[in-house]
Every structure is written in structure tokens, then in C-alpha cells.
Amino acid sequence: MNHSIHSADRATHLKIVVVALVAGIAVAGFSIFARTGSDYTQTAHVVKAGKPVAVTNSDAMMVR
């Protein structure tokens, strides 16, 4: 058993690369499945500005 990545042979490096690729593909596949499994319908609501309002009295302190 190799306890260091520096002393590992070619087969051990290949195993690490294969495990990393499989894990990356699994995460990407799960995220795509989770994204398409949900209903993400977007609705736009138009908000029109009303008349301007002036605040003349407030208990809040004004800091300039």
C-alpha cells in the first residue's frame, strides 16, 4: 500500500484519476437530474410606480 502520492506507481495514479472522473460525472449527473426534475416556471409581474410620497414627520434620526 502506498501511503504517499509521491511514491505511488502509475497504476495508483490511474486509479485516483478514474475515481475522480467517476465522482465528477456522478455529481454532474445528479445536479442535472435535480435541476430538470423541478418545475422552474418563471412569471414576470409588472409593477408600476405610483404617485410620489413625501414623508414630513418621522421618529427616525436623520444622519448626514
Image (cartoon, grey):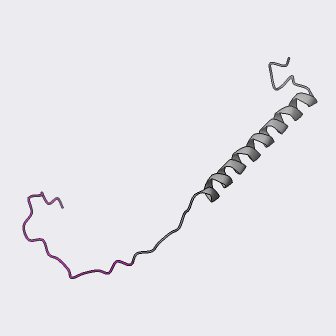
Q: Position of residue 9 (x, y in %)?
A: 91, 26
Q: Residue furthest right?
A: 10
Residue at point 40%, 75% (across, down): 45
Determine if the magenta segment contains residue 41. no
From the viewer's perspective, tell me whether residue 8 is left or right of residue 26: right
User: Relative to 55, does residue 63 appear above or below in the rendering?
Assistant: above
Residue at point 45%, 74% (across, down): 44
Q: Position of residue 20 (x, y in %)?
A: 78, 39
Residue at point 17%, 59% (across, down): 63
Q: Nearer the viewer, residue 10 or 23?
A: 23
From the viewer's perspective, tell me whether residue 14 is left or right of residue 50: right
Find the magenta span and give its range: 46-64
Q: Position of residue 51 (x, y in %)?
A: 21, 82
From the viewer's perspective, tell me whether residue 42 is left or right of residue 57: right
Q: Nearer the viewer, residue 32 or 4?
A: 32
**Quadrant location of the N terminus?**
top right
Q: Quadrant of residue 50?
A: bottom left
What is the number of callouts on the image?
0
Q: Quadrant of residue 48?
A: bottom left
